Image (cartoon, rainbow, N blue to C red):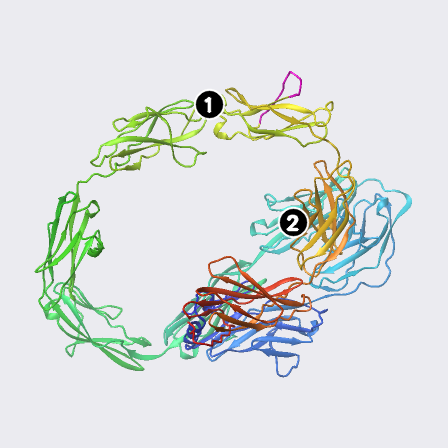
């Protein structure tokens, strides 16, 4: 069976070439490739066309649809658009390079649609999945002036965007008065990403001004602005309160593909400003859901089938409420459960293929043969993904495809059907079969033939007649039950079909069975003694016999046993075992074998040597206190060596496995069956076990006891690392490390925080009832900043108060305020396509000293809230921003912060990242090796329009198995390397630009050892060798 590419919307797999799975030398892998290619097979897709969006603003009006298939003979290609064949010879706008379709001067009117690649050779034809080609564009707004909108203060308003023609989706934002002042969305203002409209639930005087709708194409990043819409206030009074009215909402039916993020919008006008709430009518809103834009957007990531249902948004204020309800329906693309595979069948047989897929809606199925629809006929049945073809003919050979599809997508599974036709042929003829009297004999007849041949048997030129003792099985094997000497003779199997016939002769000889006697059957010895095991055989003198000795069913290698075993063969086959060791005990077997039969007999060699003791009996907990447990157990087997001591072990939820515990008495001697475990922790769950030891060693542990909990007790461990500081003015902050559950000693555990100002006598004590607490804050307006306090922290539980920690000095908070001034002299430098370095100076000294800085970065023409924020670890005044988009303008501001709050931000500065690094790796690597010198060259990398120009190359050399690499930089596309003697070296090349390093080339592996070298790589690797060394 040859694995095939089964493909469809959203899924593809490749199983070619084999270099991805196995490591070969360049020469051997090419030979393997030619070997496999000697067999003819139908087309199999390696690469299929993908959905694509082409920008009409592109300078290069050229679209490339990719397609590649393997096959033998090599496939040819053609293309279909919307089911019609593309004539690449008649239409100059189309051209084919290998299987790729090139569309010149592409336009939406002519070239929009679904494309399929068709690959064909003499075996058959297959169709790729279809790929949708769309075109990205963004028109201009109408230039007609927009009228002013006048409303009363307190009234709601909707400003219409009316976007221009566009494809695909666009992002909406609104400019207030002038760039870069964007409308900030909150509970009162909302921008719908469905309609583009700006909704203001309650207009305020500060809203008066000019509004411009900005739309951005998500593919081309092109932006256009609408004419301004003035918003003014009427002077005839203020709007009174009124109940909410939902103006923006999600559709009544929302369709979403499984796995995507769904955003449901809901916004209302009203006075007072309405509050938006959400609910799911049947069940709860998924926990993964998030509310965005002051609850106006319900966002559900990674949508699943169980998230389907009716959702309701409700808008409420003091004047009333209103709601909107819609249904979310989740669909799934088809996914394969079972697919079809390449099949070879005989002419006249029946083909039964079945493909199964899941999806919502449930997929339907159709079949293709050589790229054309397969229709039901007298011999062809197609029902629910099953294909049955009766009485196969040679014309049925070819490429078949099962297509599972629903209204949202389709997937393809491909397979080749090969119809076989050949005369019968046997691989061997004749051969002899030797059997023994009384045994059953099977004479096989398995010719290669297609269709299946008719089989007949004869013995000594007479037809074999089936009987109760002689049977012809369904697989054409002749079976003889309870064979005898009269069954000897020549048996001929004849196979015939319409293409010819063949015969196989089997000569059957029947011999007397072999008898084997092994003595002694059982023997008990002690260490150091010797014994002889004798294996006597009676057999047919015309047959040779061979012997094999086994120990515990494993072949016995006498050469590896240090001279303890000696094989002696005379009339019988004897085995002498000298100076027996403990490990020699077990079951010994003698296997005698001739060409006719094989006989096994067993003998047991036992020992009485001592071993470590067996496990003691189950452990019983007799009595439990807060720190002790009285245990009892029963003796286990001592294995011929008296037990000397017992070891008691315990395990708790907080221990690292089983631990030995102290006991009373200590030690626990071998004649005892009880002991007391001491120094346990109160209020901890324990289980116990016992391990016995004798003079030979330590045995297996007993079964564990039931789980028991020790009694409660007053806490005995005080908190540690008591400290303080920070907080707001007039605050005393005290913190500590919590006491672990193991040492809380009972229920009702908590902390007692005691403190007093230095020089005073009385302690103030506060109870902290949570066992997990780590901080206590005390506020008093009377004490000034940095007042010293003596502090200690104690513990308690239901049994009473435990110890206090050592007394430490803690100062009250310094107090103060957030930073008042922004950092100054903010500068930014582009390091690469994804990195910007930001530098600044701290604000002037004064109140509100910063403890760190926060750097904000966002893309030009976007709102600051959509950007990223990153904080320094301390008072550093530089930061490296990473993970940025290449060739993009960013705005950057810096603000200080401390434990009170954040200060004002610096004025934004603009900086653009460098163009992206070249995406293409250096290709066509060539190498020449002379001794330990390697001359390496490659094709120069040409940067695309949106990429940084190549300024040189980086060559990395490292020895295999080591992490360190040697780096060589060169402005040229060639370099000479000197390799040390011995070892395998890995070489790769990258283009270098201002935007960073480009993609790595294929790796070159060079072996230098005793004048030999070899290179490993991929199929685009070129090799040249000179000198006396050889490639391997």
The answer to whether residue 374 is seen in the rendering is no
Numbered circles on residues, count: 2
Point out the stretch of residues depicted in magenta.
756-769
- Image check: 605 left or right of 1019? left
Residue 547 x, y percent position in the rendering: 16, 60
Residue 873 x, y percent position in the rendering: 65, 43
Q: Looking at the figure, which quarter contains the C terminus?
A: bottom left
Residues 755 and 80: in front is 755
Mark drawn on residue 366: none
Q: Looking at the figure, which quarter contains the N terminus?
A: bottom left
Relative to 841, does residue 440 appear above or below in the rendering? below
Assess whether residue 760 is covered by the magenta stretch.
yes
The 10 Å Cα crowd at callout 2, few under 14, some 14 to 19, many 20 or more, is some
Q: Quadrant of residue 260?
A: bottom right
Assess whether residue 939 is covered by the magenta stretch.
no
The answer to whether residue 1014 is seen in the rendering is yes
- Image check: 849 left or right of 395? right
Relative to 721, does residue 482 appear above or below in the rendering? below
According to the picture, the residue beneath numbered tag 2 turns out to be: 299
Q: Quadrant of residue 463?
A: bottom left
Query: Could you give the CA–CA distance between mark 2 and mark 1, rounded to whole angstroms?
Result: 50 Å
Mark drawn on residue 712: 1
Mark 2–mark 1 CB contact (< 8 Å) = no
Q: Earlier in the sequence, mark 2 or mark 1?
A: 2
């Amino acid at each position: 069976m040859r694995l095939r590419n089964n493909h469809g919307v959203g899924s593809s797999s490749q199983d070619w070439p084999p270099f991805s799975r196995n490591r070969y030398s360049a020469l051997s892998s090419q030979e393997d490739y030619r070997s496999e290619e000697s067999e003819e097979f139908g087309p199999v897709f390696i690469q299929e066309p993908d959905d694509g969006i082409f920008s009409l603003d592109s300078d290069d009006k050229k679209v490339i649809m990719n397609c590649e298939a393997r096959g033998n003979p090599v496939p040819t290609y053609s293309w279909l658009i919307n089911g019609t064949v593309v004539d690449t010879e008649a239409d100059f706008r189309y051209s084919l390079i290998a299987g790729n379709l090139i569309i010149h001067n592409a336009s939406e009117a002519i070239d929009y649609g679904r494309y399929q690649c068709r690959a064909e050779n003499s075996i058959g034809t297959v169709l790729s999945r279809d790929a949708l080609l769309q075109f990205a564009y963004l028109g201009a707004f109408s230039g007609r002036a927009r009228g002013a909108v006048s409303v009363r203060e307190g009234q709601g308003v909707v400003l219409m965007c009316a976007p221009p023609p566009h494809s695909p989706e666009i992002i909406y934002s609104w400019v207030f008065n002038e760039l870069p002042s964007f409308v900030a969305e909150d509970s009162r203002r909302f921008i719908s990403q469905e309609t583009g409209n700006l909704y203001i639930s309650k207009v305020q005087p500060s809203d008066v001004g000019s509004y411009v709708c900005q739309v951005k194409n998500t593919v081309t990043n092109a932006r256009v602005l609408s004419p301004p819409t003035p918003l003014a206030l009427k002077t005839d009074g203020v709007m009174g309160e009124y109940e909410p009215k939902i103006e923006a909402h999600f559709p009544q039916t929302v369709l979403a593909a499984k796995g995507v993020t769904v955003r449901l919008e809901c916004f209302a006008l009203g006075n007072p400003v309405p509050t938006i709430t959400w609910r799911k009518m049947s069940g709860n809103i998924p926990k993964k859901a998030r509310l965005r834009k002051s609850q106006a957007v319900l966002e559900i990531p990674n949508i699943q089938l169980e998230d389907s249902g009716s959702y309701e948004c409700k808008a409420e204020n003091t004047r009333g409420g209103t709601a909107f309800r819609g249904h979310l329906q989740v669909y799934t693309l088809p996914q394969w459960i079972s697919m079809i595979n390449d099949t070879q069948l005989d002419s006249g047989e029946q083909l039964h293929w079945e493909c199964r897929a899941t999806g919502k809606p449930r997929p339907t199925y159709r079949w293709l043969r050589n790229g054309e629809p397969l229709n039901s006929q007298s011999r062809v049945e197609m029902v629910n993904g099953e294909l049955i073809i009766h009485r196969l003919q040679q014309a049925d050979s070819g490429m078949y495809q099962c297509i599972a599809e629903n209204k949202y997508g389709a997937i393809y599974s491909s397979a080749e059907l090969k119809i076989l036709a050949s005369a019968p042929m046997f691989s061997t003829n004749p051969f002899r079969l030797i059997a023994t009297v009384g045994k059953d004999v099977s004479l096989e007849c398995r010719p290669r033939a297609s269709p299946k041949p008719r089989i007949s048997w004869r013995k000594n030129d007479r037809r074999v007649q089936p009987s109760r003792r002689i049977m012809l099985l369904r697989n054409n094997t002749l079976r003889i039950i309870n064979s005898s000497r009269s069954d000897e003779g020549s048996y001929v199997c004849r196979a015939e079909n319409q293409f010819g016939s063949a015969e196989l002769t089997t000569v059957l000889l029947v011999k007397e069975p072999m008898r084997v006697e092994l003595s002694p059957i059982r023997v008990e010895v002690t260490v150091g003694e010797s014994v002889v095991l004798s294996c006597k055989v009676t057999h047919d003198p015309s047959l040779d016999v061979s012997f094999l000795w086994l120990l515990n069913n494993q072949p016995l290698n006498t050469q590896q046993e240090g001279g303890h075993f000696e094989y002696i063969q005379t009339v019988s086959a004897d085995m002498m075992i000298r100076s027996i060791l403990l490990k020699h005990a077990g079951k010994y077997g003698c296997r005698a074998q001739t060409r006719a039969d094989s006989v096994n007999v067993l003998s047991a060699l036992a020992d009485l040597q001592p071993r470590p003791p067996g496990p003691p009996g189950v452990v019983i907990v007799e009595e439990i206190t807060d720190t002790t447990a009285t245990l009892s157990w029963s003796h286990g087997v001592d294995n011929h060596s008296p037990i000397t001591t017992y070891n008691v072990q315990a395990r708790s939820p907080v221990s690292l496995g089983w631990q030995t515990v102290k006991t009373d008495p200590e030690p626990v001697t071998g004649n005892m069956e009880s002991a007391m475990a001491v120094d346990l922790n109160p209020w901890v769950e324990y289980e116990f076990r016992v391990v016995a030891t004798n003079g030979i060693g330590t045995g297996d542990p007993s079964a564990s006891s039931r789980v028991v909990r020790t009694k409660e007790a007053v806490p005995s461990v005080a908190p540690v690392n008591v400290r303080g500081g920070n907080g707001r003015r007039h605050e005393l902050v005290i913190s500590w490390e919590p006491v672990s559950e193991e040492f809380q000693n009972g229920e009702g555990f908590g902390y007692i925080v005691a403190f007093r100002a230095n020089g005073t006598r009385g302690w103030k004590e506060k109870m902290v009832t949570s066992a997990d607490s780590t901080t206590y804050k005390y506020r008093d307006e009377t004490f000034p900043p940095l007042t010293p306090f003596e502090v200690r922290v104690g513990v308690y539980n239901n049994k009473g108060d435990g110890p206090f920690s050592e007394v430490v000095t803690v100062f009250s908070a310094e107090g103060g305020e957030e930073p008042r001034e922004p950092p100054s002299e903010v500068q930014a430098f582009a390091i690469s396509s994804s990195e910007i370095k930001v530098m600044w100076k701290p604000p002037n000294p004064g109140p509100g000293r910063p403890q760190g800085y926060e750097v904000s970065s966002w893309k030009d023409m976007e709102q600051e809230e959509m950007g990223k924020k990153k904080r320094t670890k301390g008072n550093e005044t530089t930061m490296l921003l990473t993970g940025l988009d290449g060739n993009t303008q960013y705005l950057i501001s810096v603000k200080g912060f401390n434990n009170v709050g954040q200060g004002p931000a610096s004025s934004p500065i603009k900086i653009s990242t460098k163009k992206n690094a070249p995406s293409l790796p250096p290709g066509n690597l060539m190498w020449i090796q002379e001794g330990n010198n390697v001359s390496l060259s490659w094709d120069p990398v040409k940067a695309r329009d949106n990429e940084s120009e190549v300024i040189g190359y980086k060559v990395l050399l490292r020895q295999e198995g080591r992490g360190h690499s040697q780096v060589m930089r060169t402005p040229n596309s060639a370099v000479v390397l000197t390799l040390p003697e011995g070892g395998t070296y890995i070489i790769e090349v990258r283009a270098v630009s201002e935007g960073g390093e480009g993609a790595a080339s294929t790796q070159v592996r060079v072996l230098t050892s005793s004048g030999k070298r070899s290179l490993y790589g991929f199929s685009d690797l070129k090799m040249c060798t000179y000198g006396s060394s050889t490639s391997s």
